[in-house]
Amino acid sequence: MAESNLRREIAEQAGVLGRLVGEGSRQVEPIVRKLRQRPPRFGLIAARGTSDNAATYGKYMLGAINGLVVGLAAPSLITVYHRKLDLREALVIGISQSGQGLDVNAVLEHAREQGAYTLAITNTPGSPMAEAAESVIEIGAGPETSVAASKTYTGELAALAMLAAHWSGEAQLLAELNQLPGWVAQVLEVEASVAACAQAFHEADTMVCVSRGYNHATSFETALKVKELSYVAAHAYSAADFRHGPIAMLERGFPVVAIAPEGEALADMAALIDEITPTGARLAVVSNEPALLSTTDLQVRLPSGMAEWLSPIVCAIPGQLLALHLALARGYDPDRPRGLHKVTLTR
């Protein structure tokens, strides 16, 4: 198989996350002290592209673990419509691999003027985003040369997970966080299974990625990677939203990727798979639940015993590998997706 920058960077993720989680206390505890001194009333996360999917994960996780109501910012309210937002007593987080997003940084600057506590999550120390925020979590993933983000995306998710776990102070969550690099190392071993899914789907022009709860972000991130690398029109849905109309698209052979790790959302994903099966759709299941995997021959087995709140970090990797192998199967260079650049600046 042809080597690529993307594949090399996908393979680096266990090491990147091991280093990031290992230094979690040093980076996150000063932030947690400020949050306890200035408890926010709500949270707002500003991001674009891949980082916007990380923001979706943060919305679910900070709500589930820390009880914080979190919304996703609409930066154009500030940069296009020039509106003044009341962000007092808020925790406002900006997420960007490069730290150069003009509109995301404008949200942080506006929030800081309002007296909000601002936090940047970035792979680029000294970037405009790092300068705009009061506090910074540095991902420390090293240079990412592929246009498609891999290690910086999972690093963003891990940074959010570190924040939530340390803020909660719960020993079990901190212990599970320390297991994350091992789970990532295990899931990197499923590449052959993912390649089989790509081979089964490579002639399709459209597909669906579906999940629920914490992994709502994963369905969107998988679909984004598939679109940008293989040019397949991949659509992402929550299992709940998928039932509200889009399920009507399904017919014999239609590709569906169901992301369904063990946890509280598993029962609904199992019910959805039962609804999908009679349509004859071509189903790939990403799971660590044996009964669910047995519903199809396209199986991507996740590590057993994973904590559901951390599963989007692990589940992102089969999505990255699927996009990589679809691009290769369709004859495209995964390091040179057409029309894209590593850094995209929007206002």
Image (tube, rainbow, N blue to C red):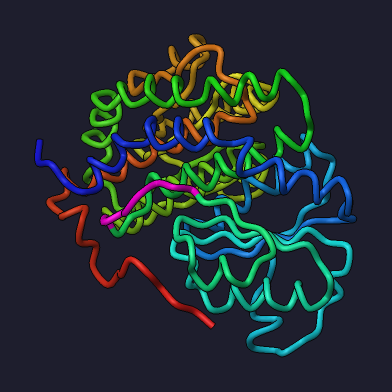
Left/right of residue 107 with respect to residue 47 in the rendered view: right
* Residue 104 position by quadrant: bottom right
Residue 291: in magenta span: no
Determine the residue positioned at 31% across, 39% down: 10
- Quarter of the image that includes the N terminus: top left
Q: Which residues are magenta?
A: 139-146
For residue 168, above or below residue 3? above
* 190 shown above or below 163: above
Please state the total of marks drawn on the protein image. Answer: 0
- Give x and y (percent) for residue 341: 31, 70
In percent of the image, x 44 and y 77: which residue is there? 345
Question: Which quarter of the figure has residue 317?
Answer: top left
Q: Position of residue 343 (x, y in %)?
A: 37, 69
Determine the residue positioned at 60% across, 74% down: 105
Residue at the outermost left position: 2
Of 345 and 213, the residue lying toward us: 345
Image coordinates for residue 263, horizontal then vertical, percent: 65, 21
Q: Which image quarter holds the C terminus?
A: bottom right
Residue drawn at point x = 49 percent, y = 48 percent: 139
In the image, 207: left or right of 121?
left
Percent position of residue 154, x then y: 47, 42
Relative side of 47 to 9, left or right: right
Give the dominant element type of the magenta stretch: helix, strand or loop.
loop
- Left or right: residue 174 versus residue 182 is right
Figure quadrant of residue 260: top right
